[in-house]
Amino acid sequence: MDIEEKFLKEFVKVTQQASIATLPKIGKKNKNEVDKLATDAMRKVLNNIEMKGRVVIGEGEIDEAPMLYIGEILGNNDFPEIDIAVDPLEGTNFAANNLPGALSVIAASYKNNLLNAPETYMNKIAYGSDIEKGVIDLDYDFSKNIKNLADFKNKKLEDITICILDRSRHKDIIEEAEKLKLKTKLISDGDVSGALLVTDKKYEVDLFLGIGGGPEGVLAACALDAYNCGFQGRFIFDDDIATKRAKDMGIVDLEKKYELKDIVRGDSIFCATGITNGELVKGIEISGDYFMTDTFVTHKSRNIKKKIQEKVQKIT
């Protein structure tokens, strides 16, 4: 069943207001305070939507409120029932230090169509819609994926660009990329936006990969699905607490490799509004009592893939 078109406008409003709410704390060096502003604003707007929304991707469990926690019910109606994935502030460090790339992100689908995922790490890989199935696979080693990709695209290895989080856990991949003479785009945070760089050739990223947040993987998958891009992910359960949480959520196969169809099983909406300027979207600009916002949106069933630039007022 397709999501009603009116919800795209509603969810755009959610990320717009969450982004605007962060402005008093941008550059103030406190990532928890700026995150709380985004979260509180997001919750407020979500609770005014005529739906019964359930957070399936959030920022922790119920005892970690005031974050938008997994299982939280939002909205002011009993119907329709909608599963929601949220990251009120992707790039908390970016916002706290007034650096490029901070976003407010939400994705939504009808009940049971969006993977109910734990807040743990995920090994993931994303690539463009022009790549045939089987060329890239999470189970291949890094070198095989790169050589397959270069062969398929008829490119030299030195013309392939990968995007990966700049983390010590990726040391081996980064060193291997250097040996292969690849172009490497290292990002310090923000692996939702990092994964989305494969959606358009203008970003000049051939492959996004590495270990990052599982929730961010699910969020990115919604947008990637609308672009018919490729995505695979596998959760990493490295302690008993994470394992128990996964089993409580109904995850039986802890080694499962998730394809896009496993993560997003139907129509979905994705919205990401810029807070500070980034590659995907511009940051908030203040114009008197108004705020100029830039939002990256997708709505799969309606083949909507665009940016919405809109002047809005802050909801009080």
Image (cartoon, helix red, strand yellow):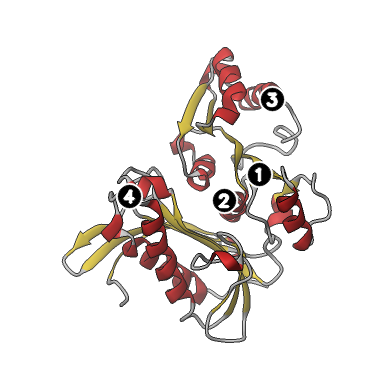
Q: Is residue 154 left or right of residue 33?
A: right
Q: Say which residue appears at 37% left-offset and 58% top-offset.
A: 33
Q: Which label's residue is closer to the chain start, 2 or 4? A: 2
Q: Residues within 10 Å of mark 1 (few under 14, many from 20)?
A: many
Alpha carbon separation for disc pair 3 and 2: 26 Å
Alpha carbon separation for disc pair 2 and 4: 19 Å
Q: Is residue 212 left or right of residue 95?
A: right
* Residue 45 % position (x, y): 43, 75
Report whether residue 156 is seen. Answer: no
Element carrying mark 1: strand
What label sits on residue 276 in the rendered view?
Answer: 4
Q: Mark 2 near mark 1, Cβ–Cβ under 8 Å?
A: yes
Q: Locate the N terminus by quadrant.
A: bottom right
Q: Mark 4 near mark 3, Cβ–Cβ under 8 Å?
A: no
What label sits on residue 122 in the rendered view?
Answer: 1
Q: Which label's residue is closer to the chain start, 4 or 1? A: 1
Q: Mark 3 near mark 2, Cβ–Cβ under 8 Å?
A: no
Alpha carbon separation for disc pair 4 and 3: 36 Å
Q: In which quarter of the view is residue 223 placed?
A: bottom right
* Residue type (three-letter) at the residue carrying disc 4: Thr
* Residue type (three-letter) at the residue carrying disc 3: Asn
Looking at this rendering, what residue extends furthest in the left direction? 288
What label sits on residue 148 in the rendered view?
Answer: 3
Element carrying mark 3: helix
How many labels were placed on the picture? 4
**Foreground label between 1 and 3:** 1
